[in-house]
Image (cartoon, rainbow, N blue to C red):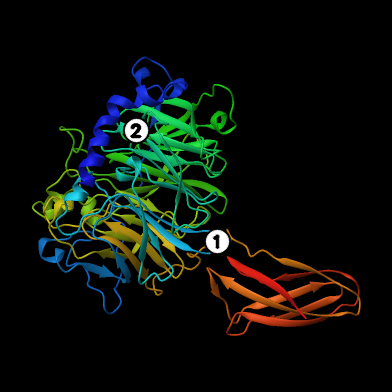
Amino acid sequence: MRAFTVLGGLLLLAVVTSVAFAQGNPLNDLFAIGQGSGDSPTAATIQKPPDPSYAPTPPPSSCVPGSRPEPGVDGRVPADSIGKGLNCNIGLVGHQGTEGGFKTFRYVDPAGHVCAFYDTTLLFPTNFANPGGGSHGIAVLDMTDPAHPKQTATLDTVAMESPHESLNLNERRGLLAAVNGNPATYPGFVSIYDVSQDCRHPVLDADGPYARFGHESGFSSDGKTFYATSTALQAITAIDVTDPKDPHAIWQGNVYSHGMSLSDDGNRAYIADPKGNMLILDTSQIQARKPHPTVREVSRITWDKASIPQNAIPFTENGHPYVLEFDEYTQQTLNPSGDPDQVGAARIIDIADETHPVVISNIRLAIDNPAEHKAAKGDPGTTDPAQGYAAHYCNIPTRVNPKVVACSFIASGLRVFDISDLLHPKEIAYYVAASKKDTQNGYDGSNFAMSMPAFAPGRQIWYTDGPSGFYVLQVDKSVWPTGATPKKACTAKSRARHLRVRKHKVKRVRVTLTKSGRRVRGAVVRVRGAGLKRKAKTNRRGQVVFRLKARRSGRVTVSSPGCGRKLRVRTLH
């Protein structure tokens, strides 16, 4: 019953959204579409510098014991491998759910709760109809034990039921947002959730028609601007979410954009133009909240084997700026005259001179090259032009000196690459989930790995596969590059406590240390100030007792290093 209710609501949106909600904010006026409103920057000339080699990225040189290596060409999954699955140098830690979508995120809230968020919908409402399980909305998981993910909530606003590729997380502010979308776009209903209080139970901050259309999105690093992009139309909406309970559109752009990522300062957008190029857009006036902001196209770049650019992520290596860009599908998917054997993959682009970007290396599987792809005709993963062996989403664990790239290569599953040498990437691991025939893969039985992966401590990678749900994987340490695990700043530093002491007076205090509601034993607690300097470890009850005799009157500070811990200090008489 719920499926019909939500579906009916989605169908009605196109009719009633602008009438019911857009009054009072001209930027939200859906009836203005096609009337020339919005910012139309002068298009930059599309540059095409010489491409680097399109030779396949070297596959793993060997697989650790217990692996199930692919039988032939790297990336190819023939029919007899589908039900068993394939893996090399990576193993299963945990699994949850029966369907997966386009985005996977990991988040640690200030209290120390570890959560995962993922969308369950490749194409609404087929997820409802899956006879093997059925799912809807955004799944919220408690990841305290990655081997046993526990679903604690389902986000089911209209935008979260059909977010398509737009689910986005701003870690700095703990905001989870999405805009209603599908392959042809929907009216731009946006939902924003606060996950910072307790990520296991997000709280809805806002839900309304704040954008024109939806499909993909971008989020500024400061968490104050959410961009809704529509892909099939020249329509980007910048939404001010400084107050997430009162979002409002501040810019409408007549620019094609599939996925987009923002620079750390918010002044540049790196846009995957679905028409076959990457755009660098100056968004500084939006970021600075200039009245009536405009944007400027800085540059555009294309490459020989461009299919449908999906997204682009900026990063630096020793301070030098680059972009990781990745394409989806084939050149024929949207163009009947295109080459069905020119398959989308990934590349690294040097943007030190942002007016003249240059592709410096490619990340592609052997099956993505024309001869090998043509020879694979008849494989279950080659029958659907909106699936196949192409890349779809990639991710990096950090934007500063990343050493690893993880990509969902659709029918080829999850692939992991070492980019320690940016000019010579190499594949180090892969995981093709054992699959089955169902509605999500059109009953061809192949993987439908479309999800942007997320990285977790302990060499873990989280992602989803359309027909089989959410996976926690662990890369073998023998292939994990040195320095690939970033030291991430704590977002929930333990708050110190203070108390007053008097000179030469004895005071006994009991300190109780907890994290996520559980007592922490064996942790160091420090007391400093008023001539005192003590430290001790908590006992099995998470407690330690100090006998303090101060050298002078004043304030002492009680602290414990770590992340997400809570201190309770009580004076004993």
342, above or below 187, in the image: below
Residue 11: % across, % down: 24, 32
Query: In this view, which residue lies farthest toward the front?
Result: 573
Name the residue at 38% across, 15% down.
36
Kind of residue sitting beneath label 1? Lys
Query: In this view, which residue lies farthest toward the left?
Result: 378
Q: How many labels does the image show?
A: 2
298, above or below 432, in the image: above
Q: How crowded is mark 2: few (under 14 residues within 10 Å), some or many (20 or more)?
A: many
226, above or below 347, in the image: above
Q: Which secondary structure, mark 1? A: loop
Name the residue at 21% across, 52% down.
389
Judging depth in this view, the residue of 517 and 397 nearest the camera is 517
Sequence-earlier tag: 2 or 1: 2
Residue 556: % across, % down: 80, 70
Judging depth in this view, the residue of 457 and 66 nearest the camera is 457
Using the image, tell me which numbered label, if any, was put on residue 472: none
Name the residue at 18% across, 35% down.
338
Q: Residues within 10 Å of mark 1 (few under 14, many from 20)?
A: few
Does the image show residue 405? no
In this rendering, would 273 be left or right of 357?
A: left
In this rendering, would 416 be left or right of 81?
A: right
Give the distance between the C-alpha atoms of the residues marked 2 and 1, in whole angstroms.
Answer: 33 Å
- Residue bearing mark 2: 230
Residue 521: % across, % down: 58, 81
- The C terminus - image quarter: bottom right
Kind of residue sitting beneath label 2? Ser
Q: Which secondary structure, mark 2? A: loop
- Residue bearing mark 1: 488
